């Protein structure tokens, strides 16, 4: 069996707030690439719940965070469509993402 790793290194300040994050995905050609935010979800099939880790650096600009959320919402709709084949629900999720963009005044 083949294994691979995706890692995120988080540098914290004295108050345990992320100052810098670097991620690595060897198979994807990513080597210590800096990022300002990450959202990780994993499924616990025993507890039947999503577990999450949301981190962002203290210098992550709010306008970029809004864009990050918008793009994440769009990708969730795409992933949902690929996973279920339900085009109508995926289209509804895309509408939600666009409504979010309008309400949060994202500049695209």
Image: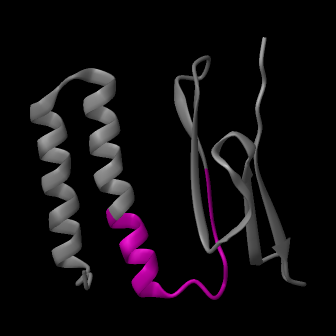
Q: Write the residue at 53% across / 30% down.
A: 49
Name the residue nearer the viewer: 33 or 18: 33
The correct choice, above or below, for 38 with respect to 11 in the image is above
Drawn side of residue 75 relative to residue 26, left or right: left
Range of residues picked out in magenta: 53-70
* Location of the C terminus (image quadrant): bottom left
Q: Write the residue at 42% across / 68% down.
A: 68
Q: Write the residue at 44% across / 80% down.
A: 64
Give percent across and percent down for residue 34. Answer: 69, 71
The correct choice, above or below, for 4 with respect to 64 in the image is above
Name the residue nearer the viewer: 80 or 22: 22
- As drawn, the residue found furthest toward the left would be 88
Drawn side of residue 83 relative to residue 1, left or right: left
Name the residue nearer the viewer: 16 or 27: 27
Drawn side of residue 71 relative to residue 28, left or right: left
Tell me if residue 65 is in the magenta stretch: yes
* Location of the N terminus (image quadrant): top right
- As drawn, the residue found furthest toward the front would be 29
The correct choice, above or below, for 107 with respect to 7 in the image is below
Q: Write the residue at 52% across / 23% down.
A: 48
Query: Which of the 4 image quadrants contains residue 20?
Result: bottom right
Query: Which of the 4 image quadrants contains residue 22?
Result: bottom right
Give percent across and percent down for residue 77. Answer: 27, 43
Name the residue nearer the viewer: 31 or 15: 31
- As drawn, the residue found furthest toward the top would be 1
Tell me if residue 42 is in the magenta stretch: no
């Amino acid at each position: 069996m083949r294994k691979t790793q995706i890692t995120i290194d988080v540098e914290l300040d004295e108050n345990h707030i992320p100052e810098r994050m670097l991620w690595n995905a060897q198979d994807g050609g990513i080597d210590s690439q800096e990022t300002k935010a990450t959202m990780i979800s994993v499924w616990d099939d025993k507890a039947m719940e999503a577990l999450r880790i949301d981190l962002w650096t203290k210098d992550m600009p709010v306008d970029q965070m809004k864009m990050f959320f918008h793009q994440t919402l769009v990708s969730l709709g795409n992933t949902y469509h690929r996973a279920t084949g339900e085009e109508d629900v995926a289209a509804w999720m895309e509408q939600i993402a666009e409504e979010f963009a309008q309400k949060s005044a994202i500049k695209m």
